[in-house]
Image (cartoon, rainbow, N blue to C red):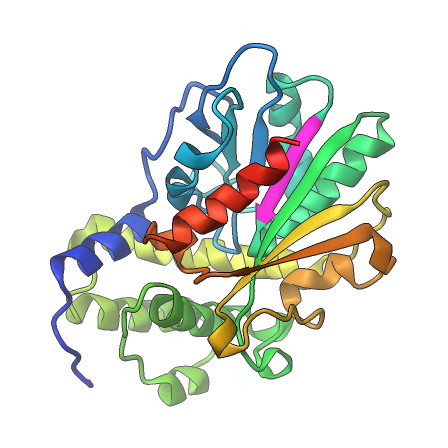
Amino acid sequence: MTTSAPLSQAKKELLRALIKNREVGSKDVPSNLIQFKKGEPGVPPFFFFPATDGGVSYFRHIAPYLPEPMGFYGVQAPGFDEEREPIRNVEDSVEYSMRHIRAIQPHGPYYIGGFCMGGLPSYELATRLQAEGEEVAVLLQVMPVFLRPWACLPGTDALQLRAIEDHTFIFERMLGIHVPLPMEKIRAMPESEERYEFVTNIVREGGYIKGPAEEHMFRHRMKMYEAGLSAMLGYKAKRELRGHIDIIVVGLEHKRELELDLNTSYTVHLRGLPSEKIHYHKLNADSAGIISGDEPDCGMIARRMADFLKK
């Protein structure tokens, strides 16, 4: 196995926090909703959907920048805490989450958003609420731009392989952590539990995770990501939004990351919308900051989000 330089303690803690994703906010709310800010009575909260893996731990980095009176909830993917089986399509996941959202806030105006793949369930939720006669005051999506060969990535017939390839990309691009995986060998393996076990063993031997509990969490995270991929790649919007979407396009200008490609997997809901319903707002920042909490990028992204929630 190829070896890599030892990880710093800070990198180890960052990776472990992302894998564990437990006890990151108040649990004094129903089911898959994680409360990061309580907010003031009578002020509508902000409900924010995460990226493909479904975890919301990194939303704690955003919370301090959002408007003070507004509550803030991460809409964690059902099954992330192993309280049930993962849901593998956007529609059922939103149906599950909407019941709990409406238990907190029975009626609009609603403030809804999503990060990366979270744009899909946030769009689905907004259009469903509108179909029920509710007001959606803000639909805000934070879209990171990654220069990847989207058309060449594994599809619905190889979700497990896609999950592994995406994790390798996330660790390297978003966290700056190189995990040496023999991808040619992994691609040759069949879609099976043995493949996940093979990857887990390499990650453990490299010192990235320790002990049975962290190994279990890592495997479960991969399975959650696979479920999220299934939901993302299978989604087709059935309703057109009334009003518009604000899209914060986050990328580094010197890397030419500020043009959002509508052929990506996480922008499918935007393809059929009239251009006047999509308001793009470019932000020259490293999208990794929203996950790592690194400044100044995290603060730049979160403050830009706050601008729309104050309107």
Can I make out residue 49 in this image? no
Please tell me how many numbered marks the rendered image carries: 0
Can I make out residue 281 in this image? yes
Residue in the picture at 78% in, 31% down: 129
Residue in the picture at 53% in, 56% down: 52
In the depicted view, which residue is nearer to us: 41 or 205?
Answer: 41
Task: Report whether 27 appears left or right of 46.
Answer: left
In the depicted view, which residue is nearer to us: 139 or 126?
Answer: 139
Q: What is the quadrant of the N terminus in the image?
A: bottom left
Task: Report whether 4 appears left or right of 215.
Answer: left
Question: Where residue 239 sits: x, y (%)?
Answer: 86, 46
19 drawn magenta: no
Instruction: Give the main secondary structure, helix, strand or loop, of the magenta stretch.
Output: strand
Task: Report whether 167 appears left or right of 119.
Answer: left
111 drawn magenta: yes
- 306, above or below 39, in the image: below
Question: Where residue 279 sits: x, y (%)?
Answer: 74, 53
Quadrant position of residue 206: bottom left
Q: Which range is magenta? A: 110-114
Question: Where residue 88 sits: x, y (%)?
Answer: 61, 52
- 64, above or below 239, in the image: above
In the depicted view, which residue is nearer to us: 299 or 78?
Answer: 299
Residue in the picture at 61% in, 34% down: 309
Question: Where residue 191 sits: x, y (%)?
Answer: 48, 74
Q: What is the quadrant of the C terminus in the image?
A: top right
